[in-house]
Image: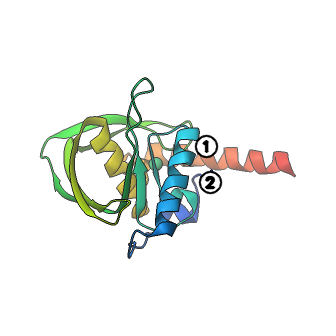
Amino acid sequence: MAKLPILTAPDPQLKKKSQPVEKVDAEIRKLMDDMLETMYEAPGIGLAAPQVGVLKRVIVVDVAKEEEEPQPHRMANPELVWVSDEDNSYQEGCLSLPEHYADVVRPAAIRVRYLDQENEIREMEAEGLLATCIQHEIDHLDGVLFVDHISALKRNMILRKLLKAKKAAAEATV
Ligand code: NI
């Protein structure tokens, strides 16, 4: 396994739409494993392939608490086949928007269909943090960031700060 560099906003790659995976083969399985390693090291609870510069519809998620056994989910071509009428609000963060958080409202429960690491079609129901996290990661596959769900005022403030931090980091390495 290998740890991959994570792209941070603003970055045009993060706004692009990812392509479906034709088949979960050895290459996609390696991508899933590398993404999980990258996510655990960050640390984070979810990661989408475009965040590591790969425009493929692949996500990994693990919302288990530190004292619990890991519960990694590897998903290719995830799609929501049902969402609840009831909504939930969570304070979301993102490895591509480090140190920024905002309350985002999404459906409280979902049913997701995906290809697992063996290329089998699976469906899973999720609620709570897991449902939020899966929706957040699927958004990444369509070039949508959590800040796209909040007011333009707040979004622009966060993106301006991230740009400033990026410029400062670039200048420091010159
Ligand atoms: Ni994210």
Q: Could you say whether the residue bearing mark 2 is in a helix, strand or loop?
A: loop
Based on the displayed image, in which of its 4 quarters is residue 150 positioned?
top left
* Residue 161 sits above or below residue 83 on the image: above
Q: Where is residue 105 shown, x and y percent of the image? A: 28, 42
Q: Could you say whether the residue bearing mark 1 is in a helix, strand or loop?
A: helix
Q: How many marks?
A: 2
Comparing 111 with 117, the one in front is 117
Based on the displayed image, in which of its 4 quarters is residue 19 positioned?
bottom left
- Which residue in the protein does label 1 denote? 161
Q: Left or right of 169: which side holds 143? A: left
* Residue 78 sits above or below residue 3 on the image: below
Q: Is residue 69 visible?
A: yes
Residue displayed at 53% across by 66% down: 54
Q: Left or right of 30: which side holds 104? A: left
Q: Which mark is residue 4?
A: 2
Residue density around tag 1, few if under 14, some if 14–19, many if 20 or more, within 10 Å: some
Comparing 164 with 67, the one in front is 67
For marks 2 and 1 on the same chain, the one whose residue lies earlier in the sequence: 2
Q: Which mark is residue 136?
A: none
* Mark 2 close to ligand 1, CB under 8 Å: no
Q: Amino acid at mark 2?
A: Leu
